[in-house]
Structures are given as structure tokens and as C-alpha cells.
């Protein structure tokens, strides 16, 4: 869990298109920009301080 739980929640609401890497709403079936159907949720795997 990060230091800012709210920010974490906001991040997890964003899904990234695997093709054009644009942001989409979580739960989107396809990218709003290019229509590509493979999106991945943006998670907290970004950076964790040890
Ligand atoms: Zn896209």
C-alpha cells in the first residue's frame, strides 16, 4: 500500500491500452482512442521503496 491510498485508488481506475498506451477508464472493453481490445489495469507495481 502506498503512502496515499486515494492516489492508489485513482491509479487503479486507469487502464492502459497495450497498443497506443492511452489511458482508459477501468472496466473499458476497448481503447477509446484506437479501439484495441487489450487493455491492462495500471497497478501499484510502479515503484515501491524498500
Ligand atoms: Zn489504444
Image (cartoon, grey):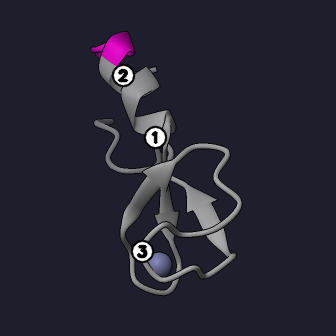
Real-space Cα distance between discs 2 and 3?
Answer: 30 Å
Q: Residue at x 28, y 36 (%)?
A: 49
In this rendered view, identify the residue nearer to me: 29 or 40.
29
Q: Residue at x 38, y 12 (%)?
A: 5
Q: Which is nearer the N-term, disc 3 or disc 1?
A: 3
**Residue 41 is one of the magenta-drawn residues:** no
Quarter of the figure with residue 26: top right
Of tags 3 and 1, the one toward the viewer is 3
Asked whether, in this view, residue 27 is left or right of residue 10, the answer is: right
Element marked by disc 2:
loop
Image quadrant where one finds the C terminus: top left
In the displayed structure, 43 sits above or below 11; it is below
Q: Crowding at label 3, few (<14), some or many (≥20) Cα neighbours within 10 Å?
A: few
**Magenta residues, dominant SS class:** loop
Q: Are marks 1 and 2 in contact (CB under 8 Å)?
A: yes
Q: Residue at x 67, y 45 (%)?
A: 27
Residue 14 position in % (x across, y down): 45, 45
The label on residue 2 is 2
> Where is mark 3, residue-wise?
33
Asked whether, in this view, residue 29 is left or right of residue 33, the answer is: right
Q: Crowding at label 2, few (<14), some or many (≥20) Cα neighbours within 10 Å?
A: few
Q: Are marks 3 and 1 in contact (CB under 8 Å)?
A: no
Residue 29 position in % (x across, y down): 71, 60
**Residue 3 is one of the magenta-drawn residues:** yes
Element marked by disc 3:
loop
Residue 30 position in % (x across, y down): 64, 67
In the displayed structure, 30 sits above or below 7; it is below
Range of residues picked out in magenta: 2-6
Q: Mark 3 CB in 8 Å range of ligand 1? A: yes
Amino acid at each position: 500500500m502506498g503512502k496515499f491510498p486515494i492516489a492508489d485508488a485513482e491509479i487503479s481506475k486507469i487502464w492502459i491500452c497495450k497498443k497506443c498506451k492511452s489511458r482508459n477508464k477501468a472496466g473499458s472493453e476497448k481503447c477509446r482512442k484506437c479501439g484495441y481490445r487489450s487493455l491492462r489495469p495500471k497497478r501499484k507495481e510502479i515503484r515501491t521503496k524498500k
